[in-house]
Amino acid sequence: MKKIFIITGAGGFLGNNIIRKLQLNEENEIRALVLPGENLKSLEGLRCRIFSGDVTKIQTLTEIFDTPKNADVFVIHCAAVVYIGSRYNAKVYDVNVNGTKNIIDKVLERQAKLVYVCSVHAIPESNDNSTVTEIYEFDPESVEGQYAKTKAETANYVLKTVREKNLNACIVFPSGIIGPYDFGNSHTTQLFIDFADGRLKACVKGGYDFADVRDVADGVINACLAGKKGECYILSNRFASIKELLDMISEVRKTKKLTTILPMWIAKFTAPLSELYYSILKQTPLYTKYSLYTLKPYCSFSNEKAKRELGFNNRDLRETVRDTVRWLEENNRIKKV
């Protein structure tokens, strides 16, 4: 039976990487949902049909969901506003919560399968540095930051709709995504750029779990085909400190390693100034009060379930850093050395 994949947020970091993987199978029909007027550079040359629409306006989703009845339809819902700011942002809730509810309504109407791309930020942290595993009840009040709260609320809604309306859906929870083909400016890509261009003179003590976007894309696609209804899957890799990540960049570029590591209290004290500075430049802030909160001395997420049920795998983090640096150089995002 013909397989049709609908990807929301298709022009985004994860979305375009998913399409790059899906197009390798010529039998896949790929439908990409992008915002009206969105820059489509990330989708140039990719084999997909582009549809203009907005997840917060359900009437704009009719065309992309108009599919043959004899086809298997998989909806990969990547569209979201990733937000690390300190002030409340109404758009974050509208897209992340209300937009997802609209997608769910269309999935139910079409009797498709949904893979909802959530985030490990929706899962409460362990207080004793123990390994975090999948959960099935989410409390927005138990996580920090507006982005995490909207993701937790929406995960609850997805699972509730599975139980009450027989929605065919599973949820994936990527950790910190890094890698090539980021045509926007995610926070980790901004970190690569600022360090490579010499603007970053110090880093903070702490780190996170970083996973290659291409491995996450594979995990998402496998969730379409093998993910079980009502199940959750963490797509993580391993913990790496910011210093370790920057050292890897230095090794690839054969440049001097960073030696200055700021105490967290200094970074937190200057975070409001950082937000203001980057807002003036209209760039992604390197750190905010919330992003500093997410950096930990250590954290661990288990991807054993995803490995077992989805065949999820990770490449070495050094390969990810190398490929990211090379891609940024080739696309003139950073200077070659």
Image (cartoon, rainbow, N blue to C red):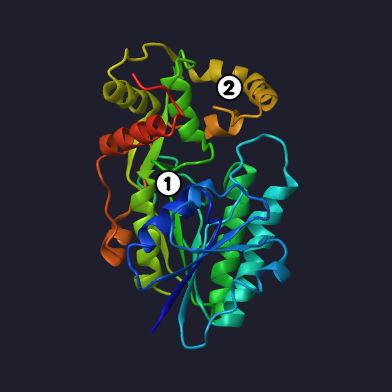
In front of the other: 29 or 307 = 29
Question: In this rendering, does residue 123 appear at all?
Answer: no
| Rendering quarter of residue 63 | bottom right
In front of the other: 286 or 206 = 286
Q: Is residue 201 left or right of residue 267?
A: left
Mark 2 sits on what residue?
268
Measure how far apart labels 2 and 1 are at the Cα level: 23 Å
Residue at 72% across, 36% down: 87
Question: In this rendering, does residue 57 appear at all?
Answer: yes
Q: Is residue 336 left or right of residue 333?
A: left
* Element on which disc 2 rests: helix
N-term-proximal mark, 2 vs 1 = 1
The percent position of residue 29, horizontal first and vertical second, equals 44, 71
Residue type for callout 1: Ser
Mark 1 sits on what residue?
175
The percent position of residue 106, horizontal first and vertical second, equals 62, 75
* Element on which disc 1 rests: loop
Single out the mark in the foreground, 2 or 1: 1
User: Residue placed farthest to the bottom in the image?
Assistant: 70
Residue at 49% across, 77% down: 168
Residue type for callout 2: Lys
Q: Quadrant of the N terminus?
A: bottom left
The percent position of residue 187, horizontal first and vertical second, equals 51, 34
Q: Quadrant of the C terminus?
A: top left
In front of the other: 206 or 188 = 188
| Rendering quarter of residue 250 | top left
Q: Is residue 187 above or below residue 16?
A: above
Residue at 46% across, 51% down: 14
